[in-house]
Structure formats: structure tokens, C-alpha cells
Amino acid sequence: MISRILITISVLVFVVVIPVLEVNASHVFNPDWPAHARFHEVWQLITNCGIGLLCLWLVWLKNKVQVASVLVILVMGGILVAHAIQGFYSGSILSGNMSKTILGMELSAFTASVAVVMAIGAAILESRSKK
């Protein structure tokens, strides 16, 4: 049960929290962004929400915690990889002039790291419970 809750919390980050933070004038409706960049933003939000709903279905109805864990790691780990290579493509994990850190990490990277760790923990717990 704990593994299911860990996955659910991780999924809520990219199905609820991130869309709430990005469907506004700073991202989806940002007039300074090219139309194609806004298109990619909405595409990413829709895709991630679909993956998140799939994760919840896998966890709660199919008891496939480990598969859902991998999907969470791919989605939230993608944030960490994009952050790690942001210098390569002149990107930034920061939005506007907001910068919040926890334990020396940007809030977004910290949150993604926590979600990845919870997904790994859920997979390990599920593996141990099946032995």
C-alpha cells in the first residue's frame, strides 16, 4: 500500500501541480514565447497527464507498481536531465525571476528528485513484498 501511495504522490506532481503552475501567462499563454514553443508546452502537459493517469491505473487497478515507477522516473527524471544539460541548449529551470532553493537545489529540481526517489522506493518496496 505504501508503494501505491508513493507513486500517487509522485504522479500528482506532474498531473496537478505542474499544470497549475504552467497554464498561465508565464508559460502556456506567454505572449513572448513563439507559438511553436507554446504548442510544445501544451503537448508536454497533455502527454505527461496521460502518462500520469496511466500510472494511477497501473498502480490501483492492475497492481503494476514497478511499471508505473519506471514511467514516473522517465517523466520526472526528464526534468533532472533537462536541468543538467540546460547550458547546452541555453535553457533554464527558472521561470521568470523566481528562484527558490531547498538544500541548495532549485525547487523544481528538488521536487523532481523527491518524486524520482519516491518512485525508486516504491519499486523497491514492491519488489521486496513479492519475495
Image (spheres, rainbow, N blue to C red):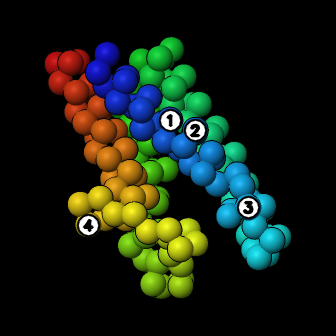
| Residue depicted at x 22% and y 33% | 124
Closer to the chain start, of discs 2 and 4, is 2
* Badge 1: residue crowd in 10 Å (few <14, some 14–19, many ≥20): some
Q: CA distance from mark 4 to mark 3?
A: 28 Å
* Circle nearer the N terminus (4, 3): 3
Q: Is residue 131 left or right of residue 37?
A: left
Rendered image quadrant of residue 31: bottom right
Quarter of the image containing the N terminus? top left
Name the N-terminal-most of marks 2 and 3.
Answer: 2
Classify residue 125 by image quadrant.
Answer: top left
Q: Is residue 116 visible?
A: no
Which label lies toward us, 2 or 3? 3
Please tell me which residue is depicted at 77% across the width and 76% down the height of the picture: 32
Q: Are marks 2 and 1 in contact (CB under 8 Å)?
A: yes
Q: Which mark is residue 25?
A: 3
Residue 18 location (% of width, % of height): 56, 48
Query: Which of pointers 4 and 1 indicates the residue nearer the eye?
Result: 4
Q: Quadrant of the C terminus?
A: top left
Circle 4 — which element? Answer: loop
Q: Which residue is mark 4?
A: 104
Which amino acid, by three-letter code, is at mark 2? Answer: Val
Q: Nearer the viewer, residue 89 or 31?
A: 31
Please name the amino acid that badge 1 sits on.
Leu
Residue at the spot of label 2? 16
Cα–Cα span, label 2 and label 1: 5 Å
Q: Between label 2 and label 4, give the one nearer the viewer.
A: 4
